[in-house]
Amino acid sequence: MTALGFLDLPVELRLQIYLDFLADCQTVQRRTQPSNIHLRLPHTCRQIDQEAGPIFRRYVSLLHEHQIQTFLHSHPSQLPEIEWADVANDGRVLQSAGPNREADTPLSSLYVALGRMTSLKRLRVFQCRQGLPYPLAQGPHIRKLGLHFERALFPKLSPSLTRYELQINPETRVELFDTVSPDKLVAMRLSGNIVSPPSSEALPVGTFAAVPALRYLVLHGITGNFFDRHTLDECFPGARLESFSYALGHRLGFEIRNHHLESLATAYGSSLRKLVLLGCSRLSTTTITHCLQNLPALEYFALKLVTVDELRSNFVLSLSLPPRLAVFKLQVLNAWYAIPLREEERGLCDAIESVVLLRDAPLHHVCVCFRTQLMVEDGRQERWARIARDRGIRLAVGPWQGDMADRM
């Protein structure tokens, strides 16, 4: 029998392979911006170029100024086709002499490329690591430099993005919704030092831009006090969240607290299907319990809890309420300066066995991480493995977070 070649496969299967390959090329690990390796494949042969070219040309990754200039001059016809872009933004703008901020000009030509991407819907922004040297870029006419993150991307209002993700360092200052329009945003990932933009006639001090289409929100590695001073429903008015993910991401980062979780459950409890909380040390177990009892649509729950002085409420017992729950992930450890709460942790383990593993409707996936002493006593880990095998549950015991925060 003659072996089939790639081009002998059905065209529908080849198209799916192209999409899967492109998805792999877009994967982010440790905030590293993807390259344009996907654009090499269409050069393999004419048929692959005809089939894969229209798919691959919808995405581009611009890492530095030389690449931006090359792309602007070599592929001008491709710019209007781009729907998804990954860009590196250094945030520098040349400030005008007067008070009119709209006259500021970005130092990089990135804004020119973005302005020509008329079909752009999804934008991921990464830390710039190869910025232009200012004196060489400006020549004899030196203007004062300023840092305005979003104005360096879009000097004026942005196109109608549906997805806006920041994969930047926690120290980078971002004036949220300064020029990026929030009206059509469905998914958003925020990182960096988030601050509110200067007040205007449209948005006076103390009010925030409405995000009526927002359904998926990730906060990872946030610094500054923007979220400390407001509840989540105040920061994102009009949203109807279906997924919320939080990860501390920085030792001096924003720590989610009880009033944030309470506002989340109150404002979005009826619609929230996924809740991820990683690196939480300021949440009380009583608040966690109350929150879970008010999330009837919850399907995915992941919690990495750092205990300090209490585990008063066994919040796992409340998980019998969400009937659609399919994924449960829990890791409990104590802060380095805190006394281990072994009896309370043992109670959580007992509740996981009775409420999660032996639940009438078996879950699909369970990940747990407790101290080794708790897992070996009374053969707990072996018993859990046997229960999971008999009930068709995919069980993982041990640290499960890994690069989960980067993939959020």
Image (spheres, rainbow, N blue to C red):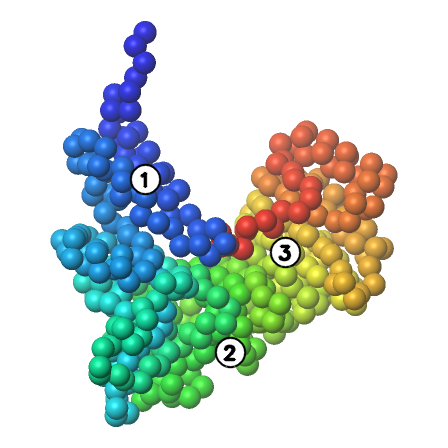
Nearest to N terminus: mark 2 or mark 3: 2
**Residue 362 at x, y percent in the picture:** 63, 39
Tag 3 near tag 1, CB within 8 Å:
no
CB-based contact (under 8 Å), mark 2 and mark 1 = no
Q: Residues within 10 Å of mark 2 (few under 14, many from 20)?
A: some
N-term mark: 2 or 1: 1
Measure how far apart labels 2 and 1 are at the Cα level: 38 Å
Amino acid bearing label 3? Leu
Question: Can residue 10 be seen by looking at this rendering?
Answer: yes
Query: In 3D space, how far apart are the residues under numbered discs 3 and 1 (Cα atoms)?
Result: 32 Å
Taking depth in this image into account, of 89 and 299 the one nearest to the observer is 89
Q: At numbered mark 3, what does the secondary structure look like: helix, strand or loop?
A: strand
Q: Kindly identify which residue carries mark 2.
A: 226
Residue type at tag 2: Phe
Give the vertical position of 359 relative to 88 (above or below): above
Near-viewer residue (308 or 284) = 308
Q: Taking 318 as reference, is 363 above or below it?
A: above
Label 3 vs 1, first from the N-terminus: 1
